[in-house]
Structure formats: structure tokens, C-alpha cells
Amino acid sequence: MAFPDIQSFVRLLEDRGELVRVSTPVSRELEITEIADRLVKAGGPAVLFENVRGSEFPLAIGLLGTRERVALSLGVSDLDDLAAKVRHLIDLKGSGGLMGMLGNLPKLRDAMNLPPRRVKAAPVQEVVWRGDEVDLGKLPILKCWPLDGGPFVTLPLVITNDPETGERNMGMYRMQVMSKNTTGMHWQRHKTGTRHLEKAKKKGERLEVAVAIGGDPALIYAATAPLPPIPGLNEFALAGYLRGERYPVVKGVTVDLEVPANAEFILEGYVDPNEPWVEEGPFGDHTGFYTLPDQYPLFHVTAVTMRKNPVYPATIVGRPPMEDAYLIEASERLFLPAAQTILPEIVDYHMPPAGVAHNLVVVSIKKEFPGQAYKVANGLFGLGQMMFAKVIVVVDEDVKVNDMDAVWKEVTQKAVPGRDTLTGRGPTDVLDHSSRGWGYGGKLIIDATTKRPEEIGSPKSSRDEQAQDTALDIFLPSAETDLPAFEGVLAQRQTDDGYWIVVLNKRRAGQSRELAEAFARHSAADGVRHLLICDEETDVNDLNDVWWTILNNIDPERDVWTVPDAGGGLLAWDGARKLHSEGFVREWPPKIVMDRAVRERVDALWHVYGLPEQGR
């Protein structure tokens, strides 16, 4: 099912009881964020705020805030159907004579929907602001979190063309409003927009930019998808394939770029590569931490086009789970067939919300030889944006990769610290605040598959003995309640499956390692394989909070180690904050927390807004 635009999707959600309208005036500064955050974490409805203070335009948020709504938006009954859809397209027959080739025709007709379709007139150009008419303050752009540097456009579809090849690109890069007609452009080091700007600089010309706000859900999703660099394959093409029809585009009013004809707003303008960059941020990011201020290019808005009665779509990011978790899951499903084409032993993979996309990947494999887990993990590190992955856990084919309780049990049962763990280095997301360098840090592979004889040091071999020798892998976890004291420990507990969680208020260099060595020598460590050292703001009783903190706060090469002289092997994870006295030179960012006054105001007005009880 193809949606003509975002407003048609809003109407459908309302008809299905999955969207509520709020007519009471509401603030775009923090208040909408607090409401949306509660609702998405409770699996609640999307919201259409009809009366945003300071703007005449309504704002829609949470449209893709559940797995079911993302599936609905992409025209499938379940996100798993995306994998089948792509597998059907790429499984072209090359043999079987004429009849075999004719069998490809339905798939080729699907592929015909890939190129966009140029139209002469478009709803998004019904109203045009030019020059001094441009005023971004009239749009209901959100200030999302208390420490944010200002209001940010959070759901922008940023369009550029390669200055050399003309290839289109669309990406979703946050945009901080700097003035009535300028914004920051958060083009990170590895992003295509950065490469286009560098090419424009070499040619001595400005880079034209168009930013779509809205479109239909398939296009919004496509802008987030990690597309491989294949000529002709771009976000418009992906959206066309998902919709089942070619995507309508129109030439910009003041820029030589094709823009989505069905968007709500288009911001047209340019980035001058010779202009000094501006300080952008802080921003409460999808990691759940603030991204600290940094220098980024300035986008000049020369025109704004829009529908006669547009709706401003927005999203928020922050502590998981958030709306972006479901977009990430859609990408998982969509690109599973491609990953399996390159690494055919992959059965499934999952990037859980606690790993905020790039910090943790769980992959199940059909294992046939020793070392295969490392082969697959290293292969994944080489696939596009999977290069940013920090920790990859490999499990057997019968393990459900999205059942994290089962996955972590497999890790303690089948991965001996040191023997079945391997660290390395590689690129990291530039938003990773704990890596050893900006965009560069450690990686960790955990082989939690059933071991072949060679992998456990047995004299037997997989070739001579097909039965798998696991006699040395028996581990009996146990949880103790009488736990030792240590300097700075605020809370601790052990789990039944072999994890010891410690909240540490770290104040000096070496404190985490001293704690790990002391605890490893204690009898309470006998039934434990992993010591998870968290920062002082972590809830030891909330495993999602524990793993979210750990995965954000480690550089695996520096912060994950096998504790010497630990009887059965103990892997320590230092997820406490890093100190300058430890040689960590960057500033450590705060976790995102909403102001108490805002929470209390939303509490008081919840029923006035007519919002469902489930989010309160």
C-alpha cells in the first residue's frame, strides 16, 4: 500500500485508534518531548498537536513509534516480510532457458519502480517563501532536551547531488536552527553529504541542498536506511520499490535538485564549503547521552516551499527504546537477505535497542567448522555501516537473536572469557563518546556458539569426530547475596545466569581494575563469568539500563579484559565514566534527563491534553 503523503498516514492511524489529537496549547520547548517520550516507551499512540505555541502549523510525532506502525507504513503486515520482499527481488534466475528468464519478469517489473518520476506541479510548492520571507521560527521546530543548544529539525530528509557524478543522496542529519534562515548541517565524517561538500570545495562552488520535511513514510524510512554505494540505487529508488510505484519528484524552485513532490515543507538553499564552520550542539542524541558541541557547516535557507495546509512531522531521540529503534529493526529485516548473500551461514541478526544500533549486534549462524564465528563477525565489520559495530555476539542457529535473556545466557554458558573473546580495532561512530579516539576505537567479538573440539583445545578434530566435544564448557552459574564492599560501590547484585552488576562512583585512575581484581578473588565470583561495572546513574535492577550504560561507556580494547587469576575466568567490563587521570582526554557527556519542572507540568496537564492513561 502506497501512501500519497504523511497526512494520509496520519488519517489512517487516527481511523485505527492509533493517533490522538491534542487541541490544548502546548510548548515546543521540552513539553512535546516529554509527552512523546512517555508514549513511545509505553507503546502508546502517535499524537497530532494542533496548537503549538508560536506556530500556526500542527505537529505530528510518534507516527512510527511501534513495530506494527512501521510495518503498516511500509506496506507489509510484519517487518519480517521485508526480508522476503527483498529476497524475492534479488533472487533472479539466470538459467532454465526462455521460461527461466520469463520467470524474472515480475521481479523486473518491481525493479521498474525504482527510478523516481518527474512531475511538473506539486502540492509541496503551493506556497513559497523567498528571501526575507523565510523565517524558520514560524515552524514548530522542537527544542527536545534541557541541555540542547537550541531547536533542532529532527526528521529532515537532506538532499544533495554529487558534484562530479550527479548521483543523488538523501540522508537524515539533524539541523540546529541558528537564525531565521540558517541551520547547522550535521554531516559527520563518514556521511555522503560530507563527501559531496568536499567535492564542491575542490570545484570551487557552493553545494546546493534541499531539505524535505514530510513525504510519505516509505521515504522517511528510506532516508535512514544504510544503502550500499551502488550507482543508481538511492533513497528515492528504495522508497519507490517499497511503495510499489515510482516516487514523484519535482524540480526545486530555487535549486537544481529534485525534491519529493508529496512533502509537507521543502527548505531550499546551499552550503558554502569555504565558509567557516559554526559550533553546533549540544544535542540529546539517539545514544541517550548528549553529543557535545562541535564544528559543522552552515546551511543557508534561500526559500521555503510548502503545502497550503501542511503538517510538521517530528521525532525525538534519547534513551532507548525510542521511535528510531523500530526504523533500525526495519533496516535489519530489509538488509538481512543481502548480508546472507555475502555470508550465507547467517541465520538472523539483531541490533537491540540497548545497543543504540551500532554498539551491539547479535548474529546467529549455521556453524559447520571451527572459527566460523570469527569469520562471520569480521565479515560483518566489513559491511557498510556495520563497520561502526562495537560488540558482536555470535550464537547458534537455534537461538532467537531478539531474546536478549536467552542470548546473555548463551554467552555465559558457551563463551569462556579469554578463550572465546577477541578484541580488535576499527572505525567507530563519531557519536561514540567512549572510544579511544574520535571515530576510532576497540571492537569485541564474543563467540557464544557450541564449540568444536579444536576450539577448546581438545586433541580430537572436527574432521575425525563429527560429534561436538563440549565437555570442558560446562558452567554452573550461581547468585550470591553476601557481596563484598569496595571503595565507591553504591549498589551491586548478581544474576542467576552468571553476571555480577556493580554501580561504581569512580573517582580515581585504576579504581575499576582494583575492584575487578578484588572481586575476582572473592568466593562470590565462583558462579560468575562477567563483571559489569556501571556508572553511578545506573539501576542494577534494570538490565536494559545496565547494558545500555555498559555498551555506551566502553572501548572494548581498553575497558573489557579477562581478570588474571580468576578461577573459572572472569570478563570485566568497565562501563564507569572515564577520567582525565586515566588518560581519557575528551569531555565526558551527561546522560539525557528531562527537567523535573517539565515532568511535573506534563503530569498536571496529562488529562487536560486528553492523552491516554498508559503514558502517564
Image (cartoon, grey):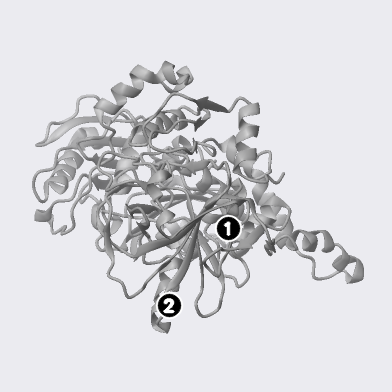
Residue lying furthest front in this view?
132
In front here: 304 or 298? 304
Q: Is residue 529 visible?
A: no
How packed mark 1 is, by other alpha carbons closer than 10 Å (few <14, some 14-19, many 20 or more), is few
Badge number at residue 487: none
Between 87 and 450, the residue placed more toward the observer is: 87
| As drawn, 289 above or below 254 | above
* SS assignment at label 1: loop
- Residue 179 lies, with reference to residue 530, above or below; the image says below
> What is the x, y in percent for residue 433?
27, 54
* Nearer-the-camera pick, 319 or 601: 601
Q: In the rendered structure, are the residues bearing label 1 and label 2 in contact, judged by CB atoms less than 8 Å apart?
A: no
Instruction: Count neighbours of disc 2 (C-alpha within 10 A) and say few if under 14, some if 14 to 19, many if 20 or more.
Output: many
For the point 59% across and 46% down, the residue is 217
Whole-angstrom CA distance, mark 1 to mark 2, is: 49 Å
Quarter of the figure that contains the N terminus: top right
Amino acid type, callout 2: Ala
- Residue 427 occupies which quadrant of the picture? bottom left
The disc labelled 1 sits on which kind of residue?
A: Glu
Closer to the camera in the image, 452 or 153:
153
Residue 189 place in picture, x, y as percent: 36, 66
Which residue is identified by label 2?
200
Q: Position of residue 191 (x, y in %)?
A: 43, 65
Residue 589 vs residue 252: left or right?
Answer: left
Work out whether residue 538 can be spotted.
yes
| 455 lies left or right of 580 | right
For marks 1 and 2 on the same chain, the one whose residue lies earlier in the sequence? 2
Seen at 38% across and 62% down, the residue is 299
**Residue on which the image places disc 1:** 368
Q: For the view shown, which residue lies furthest in the bottom direction?
A: 203
Q: Is residue 154 above or below residue 145?
A: below
